[in-house]
Amino acid sequence: MRKIFASTFGIFVAMSTFAQLYIPVTNITYTGTTTLTSPIPSSCNTGGVRAASVNYTITPSNATNQQVVWTMVDAGTTGASIKGSMFNYKTIGVATIRATIINGASPTTNYTQDFNITVEFGAVTDIRDVPTTIAAGFPLKLTPRVIGEFTPSKCVIWSIVDAGTTGASISDYNMLNTTSTGSVVVRATIENGASPTTDYTQDFTIEVTPFIPVTNISNIPLTVDQAPASFNLSINYPNPDFPDGAVITPSNATNQIISWSIIDEGTTNAKISSGSSGSSISIGNAGDLKIRATIINGASTTTNYTQDFDIKIIGPIVIPVTNISGIPATMNTLSYTPLAGVITPDNATNQFIEWSIVNTTGTVAAKLQPQGLFNSYLLVEGVGTVTINASVYKGLSETTNYTQDFTIMVIDNTIATSVNEVEITKNPVAFYNTMGTKLTKKPINGLYIVIYDDGTVEKKMK
């Protein structure tokens, strides 16, 4: 009996504690839009469904249960439905929706609250972006912008009010056709656009002018001084601050949008980029390039205008190499020397030297070994001569390498026993930092590398 009492007492205490901790919902505030606008009830808009988010806040904010389930109580004439937290509707009217929170009012009672959503008529208020001028004989597609809730331009029905002398007609729903100059009045009608039972209409006067053909396109450079290069071909929205790009003659030609294409890129690796603002071209290499400009219906109402441009691209200006020095005239057998040639002038455009062995005489064996700071080391053994070649890619011009041969005498260092008795004079010809970058003058401090005219190399510290 004691155990049963203790257990029952524990359950009672637990339930009492839960009751004390439970916080009920006292109110739901609807924060979404309670007044919505419907699409017009036009035949072109049937079946259209609009949606709005169902937003809310719960009072108190620390209520125990806050999960809301939304349901439709009465859709009225709106054709509305609830899916999750989205209110979907079709036409005007009033709909009632319900928010339910399971066990929201008490631990055993749901909390419910209803809300009314009003859907009003979204009348058309204006039609814009209808052109005021067109060229005679040039068909024009009428694609206006309708100011009104959820009313697409396809809902506009076009008709001729007064053709005047233009011979105007409407075809294919929104194509305005004319044959002569003058003024034409067209009417845009939107079924049930003013009210649920009244059409919206708006008239527009369009001047029909003579068609003005393109006769020339200019301002495209026919010579490009240096590749790579890039420039504008045409700008669809001219900016006086950026006057480059094609110039169309006459300036009032009816059609002026240019499409560009490459007819023959040759060796130029040219690419055309086009966007809403215009077109530009990038050129990678020297060569001859042919491009074409096309203006749809630029020559007449039925004929395109085309014009080709032959552009010559000149390669980059090369400062040529005139000499390479700093290579020793003699070497001892079983020795090596860095081939750190000094290029003249020191501002030559291309300065990377590629070394190769041309030939050897006597018993000389030689090989090149890339290492460290310099392009190559020359290793020799035997007695005789070795001839090496220095080649600078595009060292003379954009199409010609610079080459220079050096013949080095290889001697047996055991024969020159008195070499230490002879005063050897050597002069520095180049300075480098420890990262391998050539310096313009002798450093005043720090660690550096010096190359002498006899080919020897030393590390120095100032």
Image (spheres, rainbow, N blue to C red):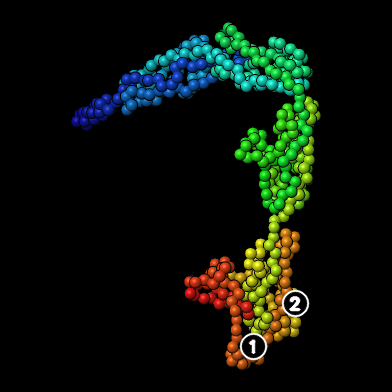
Q: On the picture, is 102 further left or further right than 392?
A: left
- Residue 88 sits above or below residue 355 on the image: above
Task: Tell me if I can see residue 178 in this picture.
Answer: no
Query: In the figure, is residue 363 to the left or right of 130?
Result: right
Labels 2 and 1: the sequence-earlier one: 2
Position of residue 237 measured from the top left corner of the image (x, y, whole percent): 64, 33
Give SS at disc 1: loop
Q: Which amino acid does the dot numbered 2 rest on?
A: Asn
In the rendered image, residue 138, in percent from the top left (x then y), is placed at 75, 23
Q: What residue is pinned by disc 2? A: 359
Mark 2 burial class by Cα count in 10 Å: few <14, some 14-19, many 20+:
some
Q: Are marks 2 and 1 in contact (CB under 8 Å)?
A: no
Residue 270 drawn above or below residue 160: below
Relative placement, left or right, of 174 versus 23 is: right
Identify the residue position indicated by label 1 in the image. Answer: 413
Disc 2 is placed on an element classified as strand
Q: Image point 62% across, 78% down: which residue?
A: 453
Task: Give the residue type that dot 1 points to.
Answer: Asn
Q: List the single residue furthest toward the left.
A: 2
Q: Residue at x 62, y 22 (%)?
A: 129
Specify the quadrant of the image occupied by residue 21: top left
Q: Depth check: give the residue in front, 435 or 380.
A: 435
Residue occupying image coordinates x 69% and y 38%: 234
Residue extending farthest to the top is 197
Q: Position of residue 366 (x, y in %)?
A: 69, 78
Closest to the observer, 36 or 355 = 355
Residue 44, given in percent of the width and then of the height, sits at 63, 15
Q: Give me the C-alpha separation between circle 2 and circle 1.
A: 22 Å
Q: Is residue 40 visible?
A: yes
Q: Label 1: few (<14), some or many (≥20) within 10 Å?
A: some
Which of the image's four quarters has the N terminus? top left
Q: For the point 38% across and 24% down, which residue is it?
A: 57
